[in-house]
Image: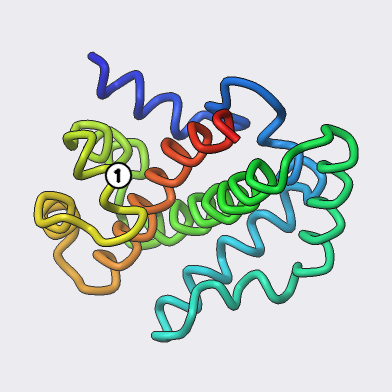
Amino acid sequence: MKALLIAAALVAPGTAWAASGDIGCIEARLGATAMQRIGDGVVAAADKGGNPASALDTDREALIAARAACRTAGNWSPSAIQAAVSYTPARATRLGAETALRNDGLDPARLAAAYAALPTEDRKSLIEKASSGAIAAVTNAAGQPRARRHVLLYFSALAAIEFYPAEFAAA
């Protein structure tokens, strides 16, 4: 039951898990179109073997302006801003990965449930270096290498969404 609640919360539009503050501020200031563009860019860069962080280049000025506006509005600490900036690309990556997964014939909601069923340590491992349990879940979710890459991006984005807000709330 807990896994289903986690999965539902992770894929719900506008979900923010922060205990305090407005971690969605940067995302809201960027807007849905920029968020989707960033996410699609992350997937495209990963598919080409490039650096997914380069997807931020297109919207770098808007991201900097949103970060500055949110910091001024909320009087956030530098560490809180860093957590929010990390969270924003994760949300965008989730959007891009969901589109790619649908194109691969996979169901993002079912994958979110598979992600949520992983032990907490396996989910956390997806932020830095995926554990063998996380890699096994990715491998089991998709047969083709391209689809596996999309599942890994999706799971990694879900992990960042789940765990970065805790850092933000503590900042």
Image location (x, y in percent) of residue 123? 26, 43
Would residue 130 be found to the left or right of residue 52 on screen?
Answer: left
Dot 1: within a 10 Å radius of its alpha carbon, few (fewer than 14), some, or many (20 or more) residues?
many
Pick the front one: 127 or 105: 127
Q: Quadrant of residue 111?
A: top left
Please name the residue shown 76% across and 69% down the image. 60
Indicate left or right for 141 with 6 as reference. left
Q: How many marks?
A: 1
Percent from the top left, x then y, of residue 13? 58, 32
Residue occupying image coordinates x 43% and y 51%: 157
In percent of width and height, residue 54 lies at 59, 78
The extreme top residue here reads: 1
In the picture, measured across the screen, residue 115 lies left or right of residue 39, that is: left
Q: Nearer the viewer, residue 91 or 99?
A: 91
Amino acid type, residue under disc 1 in the picture: Lys
Figure colour scheme:
rainbow
- Residue 130 in the image, given as x and y percentages of width and height: 23, 58
Q: From this view, report whether residue 50 is shown above or below residue 74.
A: below
Q: Is residue 71 above or below residue 11?
A: below
**Which element is circle 1 on?**
helix
> From the viewer's perspective, is 32 left or right of 130?
right
Quarter occupied by the C terminus: top right
Q: Which residue is found at the position 61% from the left and 73% from the top?
A: 55
Q: Quadrant of the N terminus?
A: top left
Pointer 1 residue: 124
User: What residue is drawn where x is 30% and y is 59%?
Assistant: 152
